[in-house]
């Protein structure tokens, strides 16, 4: 019976192509929506991705990575004094305006000030230069996207040794790093914490975060509890900080609704196109199914045939859709679009496509069980 069901399915090549195309299109829409969802979420904690540290210490009011509540300079020593902390370093993250020499326009950047002694939290993916050069006079490291942006918009090809201004102070490019783009689209500029005080707009408290690490043999999660208890500050691991940012974006922004609408549209389109086409396919084969029923084939076997046909269509459409969207993503400029093809996305999409195919199959099974065997004798 399975062989007969396959011949019925592949015998109608045009219908089979339409069925697979419907599932393929639904797969593409759902996958793109989910990839955009994970991509936007990754933007929410981009700072924690670009500035790596086992432990982050912030003000208790902070709810996500992009929120800065100034701390006191003495808080660094308080964290250092906690038993089980190997080191602690100050960090500044804020906004600044970059002005190329000889050009009137400015560019917003995310300014990161690192501890000059440890350079903790510095960019790990350097395209050019050395992070040690940040200790040079007026040295800064810019991200590769900033270089591309200046070339596209201003025709300026920035290189090591080039100079620009921030807050009327000169900055010399000593390195180019590859970083993850942030939510506000601003590019990153790294310098030392003391120098960040010159580049940032005047404010009394410049310390926004404290980076720390547990002593050898100690767990980061264990030390964060100790830091929070002894200092009154909020200490979290890197993973917890990212999770806080994702939760904040999920609950405080309309992104879940927008992405959910996108995914829902893909699901409905797949269900509508495949369901209607598959149901029409079954109707056109009613006489053949009636013949099988007249020969004594049970409804259970006929239902199995329908489910097998729906499963093959779903598998083919899913595989084709994932392949198409993967090729599309491979041609997208890295870091320029909020698209992240996380490993869990194909799993989620596969479950959604399976639900579409099973819903379609149940509709067709309902129709098949009501076929009268006598239909084969009708003119």
Image: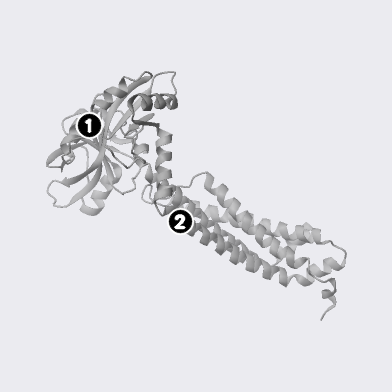
Taking the spot 43% from the left edge, 48% from the top edge, the residue there is 250
Work out how far the residue at label 2 is from the one at label 1, CA to CA, in angstroms.
40 Å
Quadrant position of residue 19: bottom right
Res. 222 in view: yes
Residue farthest to the bottom, as pictured: 379
Residue at 22% across, 41% down: 159
Residue 350 screen position, x and y as percent = 59, 51
Q: In the rendered image, which residue does mark 1 sit on?
A: 192
- In the image, residue 360 lies at what x, y percent? 66, 62
Viewport quadrant of the N terminus = bottom right
Mark 2 or mark 1, earlier in chain: 1
Q: Residue at x 21, y 28 (%)?
A: 135
The correct choice, above or below, for 203 with respect to 334 in the image is above
Position in image of residue 234 (x %, y %)? 36, 32
Q: Secondary structure at mark 2?
A: helix
The residue wearing badge 2 is 257
Lateral position of residue 88 relative to residue 306, left or right: left
């Amino acid at each position: 019976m399975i062989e007969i069901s396959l011949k019925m399915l592949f015998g109608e090549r045009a219908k089979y192509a339409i069925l697979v195309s419907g599932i393929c299109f639904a797969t593409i829409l759902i996958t793109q929506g989910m990839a955009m969802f994970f991509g936007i979420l990754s933007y929410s904690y981009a700072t924690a991705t670009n500035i790596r540290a086992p432990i982050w210490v912030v003000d208790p009011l902070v709810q996500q990575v992009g929120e800065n509540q100034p701390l006191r300079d003495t808080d660094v020593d308080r964290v250092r004094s906690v038993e089980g902390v190997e080191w602690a370093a100050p960090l500044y993250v804020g906004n600044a305006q970059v002005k190329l020499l000889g050009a009137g326009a400015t560019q917003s950047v995310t300014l990161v000030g690192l501890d000059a002694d440890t350079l903790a939290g510095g960019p790990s993916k350097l395209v050019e230069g050395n992070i040690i050069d940040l200790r040079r006079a007026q040295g800064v490291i810019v991200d590769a996207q900033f270089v591309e942006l200046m070339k596209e918009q201003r025709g300026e090809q920035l290189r090591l040794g080039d100079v620009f201004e921030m807050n009327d102070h000169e900055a010399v490019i000593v390195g180019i790093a590859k970083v993850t783009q942030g939510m506000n689209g601003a590019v990153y500029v790294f310098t030392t914490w003391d120098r960040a005080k010159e580049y940032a707009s005047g404010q009394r408290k410049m310390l926004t975060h404290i980076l720390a690490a547990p002593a050898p043999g100690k767990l980061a999660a264990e030390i964060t509890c100790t830091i929070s208890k002894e200092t009154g500050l909020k200490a979290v691991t890197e993973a917890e900080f990212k999770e806080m940012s994702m939760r904040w974006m999920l609950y405080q922004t309309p992104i879940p609704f927008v992405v959910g609408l996108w995914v829902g549209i893909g699901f409905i389109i797949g269900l509508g196109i495949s369901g209607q086409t598959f149901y029409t396919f079954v109707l056109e084969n009613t006489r053949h199914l009636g013949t099988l029923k007249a020969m004594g084939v049970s409804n259970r076997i006929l239902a199995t045939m329908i489910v097998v046909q729906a499963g093959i269509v779903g598998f083919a459409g899913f595989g084709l859709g994932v392949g198409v969207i993967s090729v599309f993503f491979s041609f997208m400029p890295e870091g320029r679009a909020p698209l992240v093809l996380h490993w869990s996305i194909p799993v989620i999409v596969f479950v959604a496509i399976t639900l579409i195919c099973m819903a379609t199959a149940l509709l067709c099974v309902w129709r098949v069980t009501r076929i009268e065997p006598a239909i084969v004798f009708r003119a």
